[in-house]
Image (spheres, rainbow, N blue to C red):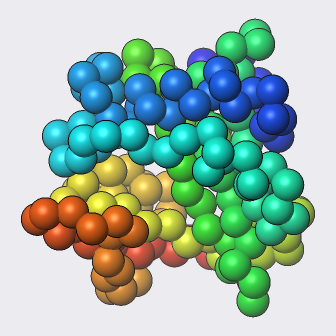
Amino acid sequence: MSNATIRLAARDDLPRLHPVIERAYRGDSARAGWTHEADLLDGTRTDIATLEPSLANPAERLLVALNGDTPIGCVQVTDRGDGLAYLGLLCIEPTLQTAGLGKRLIDAAETLARGTFGTSAMEMTVIENRVELIAYYERRGYVRTGERRDFPVAVIPPFYMTVLVKPLA
């Protein structure tokens, strides 16, 4: 996906981007890729009403990857203050995973965090049982901090998040 373009998402992108997010994280279609949560969680991952405020929040940026004018992935960057940004909502259309677009989106998110928010470190959380996904981020310079956080919504059995950080200097 070297021909994909990455830019700030606009409100008009959300109706076309939202289904990509859902396909990448949940349901049977997610199983076409390797980064999904479909074997762990049911239901929707997010909705347009939850995505919209990030477009207007000065501490957040949503980047969208496009093939022509078709959304095929995204990543969200949030300024946490004190030189720390948070990387979240990284996803790629399941049938396009393993083509290098994830690395490009991470690079774009890190560049944006440094340039826009002046951050010196990027943090992320990953469901701790997703060892292959944690290893992917470790290959990109992210390091486990040893911190474990609760999963953002209550599920049975409970999930926990592994915290990873990468210096951006």
Please tell me in which quadrant of the rendered image residue 111 appears: bottom right
Q: Residue furthest bottom?
A: 82
Residue 12 in picture, x, y percent from top left: 81, 27
* Residue 95 spot, x, y in % from top left: 41, 16
Q: Residue at x 75, y 84 (%)?
A: 81
Quadrant of the snapshot with the N terminus: top right
Q: Quadrant of residue 137?
A: bottom left
Above or below residue 50? Residue 168 is below
**15 left or right of 36?**
right
Observer able to see residue 40: yes
The answer to whether residue 34 is above or below residue 106 is: above
Tally the marks: 0
Q: Quadrant of the C terminus?
A: bottom right
Q: Position of residue 134 (x, y in %)?
A: 33, 58
Residue at the extreme front of the image, as rendered: 49
**44 lies left or right of 112:** left
Name the image quarter holding residue 22: top left
Residue at image coords 54%, 49%:
89
Seen from the viewer's position, the closer of residues 21 and 91 is: 21
Visible in this render: residue 109?
no
Residue furthest to the left in view is 157
Image point (32%, 50%), residue name = 133
Q: In the image, residue 59 lies at what x, y percent?
A: 80, 68
